[in-house]
Amino acid sequence: MNCKLWTALLAAACLCSQATPMHAQAAPGANKAIAGSGTVGGVLKDQSGAVIAGAKVELRSAVSEFSRILLTDQQGHFVFTSLPAGHYRLTVSASGFASEIVRDLSVHAGSVEANLTLKVEPAKAYVEVNGQSVGSLAATSRKVDANEQGTSRNTAEILAEAPGVSLRANGQLASIPMLHGLGDERTKVVVDGMTAASSCPNHMNPPLSYIAPAQASQVTVMAGITPVSLGGDSLGGTVSIESRLPVFAEPGGQLHEEGSSTGFYRSNGNNYGGSLTEWVASRNLGIGYAGFWTTNDNYTDGAGHKVTSTYAQSTDHTVTLAAQGAGNLVVLQASLHHTPYEGFVSAQMDMVRNYADFLNLRYRRGIGAGTLDAHVFWQNTFHSMNIGHDKSTFPMPMSMPMNTHGRDLGYTLRYELPFSTRHILHIGNELHRFVLDDTWPAVSGTAPMMGPNTFVDINDGRRIRLGTYLEVASKWTPQWSTLLGVRNDTIWTNAGDVQGYSSMYSMDANAFNGANRAHTDPDIDLTAVARYEPSASGTYEFGYARKSRAPNLYERYAWSTNWMASGMIGWFGDGNYYVGNLGLKPEVANTVSGTADWRGHAPRAWELKATPYLTYVEDYIDVNTLATTMYGMSTFAQVQFANHNARIYGGDLSGNVSLWESDGAGRIRLSGVAGWVHGSRLDTGSGLYQMMPLNARLAIEEELKGFTGGVGVQAVDRKSRLDPNRLEQATPGYALFEMHAGFRRGFLQASAKVENLFNRDYELPLGGVNFDDYMASGWMKQIKPLTGRGRSVLFNVTANF
């Protein structure tokens, strides 16, 4: 597990994505010893046989300071002459390809031939210069193992242990990642290079709901300072989820075939499902399928109380076609996502249908010494809400259908050019066009409150973002490197005329229709990061970032002040009533942060990482209270989105240590992560909404001959710093224990886990309220925070073939 701690000033720049397995071949004679001074040369090619020009080749002595660097010519050739006798290490790196190292070239006289074949790399997880990452210390990038893929309820849970991340409950299929207290659309979420918007007034279908856990292969989390090449129109940072990219057959080899099948069962909530993947490829062409299905009933909390409207079912299908050759990589994904139902205990409505289909085309090619990486994507979403079957048994007199249709269309173009052995240039351009229609059909017999007309909440809502950036990563000395970037995003938003159910909504509708609804928001982002590595035992980063975000469609265009209509808007799970604001300005965040990374080496390897940060947000989109009302025993607020200045500061700490490692006793490691965030609205000094209290995770795990086992604890402090405008509720602190065991033998992997081992009853600090429980009482009890899942036993089996 990666780590974090306190020191210096700024965090992180990195590059997201996922890397496929890498391979290089040295020709016969590459390790041949010859007497006297000599020559090392060869030809660099990709897997399809095309030569690679402009690649950096470094030859370094294994025993002295002697080193040379050169670039391959247009025919892919390289040659080092007049070399002193000795042992050398040859390192080859080419933009768009996996780096390769030949560790022992013994040179004495004559020529050593080192012909290399590199595999295409989908993208680096970090910005690299001279083979070393730049601006990446505060980032976490890792592969997702089969156990996580098979046991996570939703893909966001895979991010939970990354420093700086907390999860806000949002149904069972898509928790919302919060980075340093900033989540939802304040955090950029990229799925296989694609940016998608939620097509729901309650954000029941956020981007991470469209990739199943079984498909997630690589996760990258950049909390805080983010490179401009990976940010844009966001404040908190960037989350990138990548499915596994193609693996082709070796040159001259047979077809490459691989697949897996997974089944899982979680006792609490009767949650079960499975996945199936299959991939077949020749040297140049490949085709694959990935499918995932899950269903669950309502769960029971630690006090034995059934938490209603926590049921869900979902199915995902993805077909992938891929081709490579002559330095090109083309990948086309076609996916279907279907959620027939999902309950939302913290909302007044439930999802009764969500259907989305999308296409995602990726093209990667070496151009000169650089690499072009392009994505074109399209998504079409039909989303419906209504009173779900649990809520329909409560004193709710009628249904209320709500339908949305969202369309995402966009592209990303990125060119990476190493223009010297010290500098890499990134140039990029992005477009994301989101169009939304949100209509609520009339309900017979309910006029004038819910009829006779269709309620038009958002009519042809458009949000178009065009972004361009330039970024330079530089390695000045072996100890010092920098990352500098500038970005411009222009966001255009608009919406058509609206109408209410009846004339009782006319005043708000007429005012909205008569107003200027077109907005153009030019946003400027800046990133400056410096990294210092005085020794192999410590690395330090510090820097500054300016980031901005324009309002989303509902923040601007949710037009009705009617209590019932405004109660249908709000993705916070708090039961409050939300009204948009045509006059909202973009948010602008200025962040300073630093990361220190200390490392120990064998036999007791350890790592400790710390990241403190401070962010000042100008025009933070918060709320103003319009009115409050009592329903039964509880008070609710009607609020309007409004700009206010805010300050957020805190720190992340993470680390791991090898307690024991031997052939007989296996490997025992202790790992942990902790985070603290403090947010304030500057005009009132009150707390910002939904800030995670101090929290920590600690785990100890042993691995021995294919077997693994361990215990862990998650501790969360009480939540007492609250937002009074939205009547946020306090939650007590708690600690949850878990234990797990598993084994891997050949093609089979199995695991078992007990969650919430001691069946602790606890309230989720970011879970919102239990709106179902409140309604079931006939509004005659005080509304309470949502309680978490009680003890649950989980089994998972994966077969690889």
Image (tube, rainbow, N blue to C red):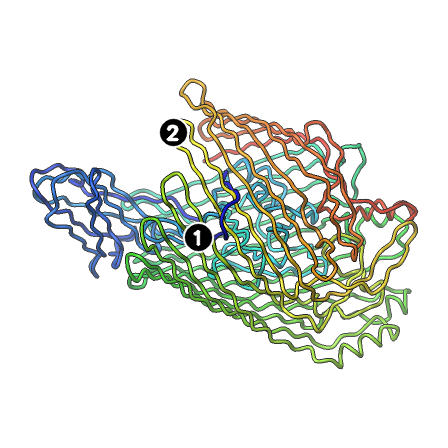
Q: Position of residue 120 (x, y in %)?
A: 35, 52
> How many residues crowd around disc 1 within 10 Å: few (fewer than 14), some, or many (20 or more)?
many
Q: Is residue 100 visible?
A: yes
Compared with residue 319, is residue 3 higher up or lower down, i.e. above or below? above
Which type of secondary structure does the marked residue at label 1 adopt? Answer: loop
Please identify the residue farthest to the top as the structure is shown. 664
Q: Which residue is mark 1?
A: 135
Compared with residue 584, is residue 268 higher up or lower down, i.e. above or below? above
Instruction: Choose top left, top right, bottom left or bottom right for residue 758.
Output: top right
Q: Residue at x 68, y 50 (%)?
A: 691
Q: Is residue 139 visible?
A: no
The amino acid pointed to by label 2 is Ala
Q: Which residue is mark 2?
A: 602
Tag 2–tag 1 contact (CB < 8 Å):
no
Q: Residue at x 84, y 76 (%)?
A: 506
Instruction: Choose top left, top right, bottom left or bottom right for residue 188.
Output: bottom right
Mark 2 → mark 1, Cα distance in angstroms = 26 Å
**Quarter the C terminus occupies:** top left
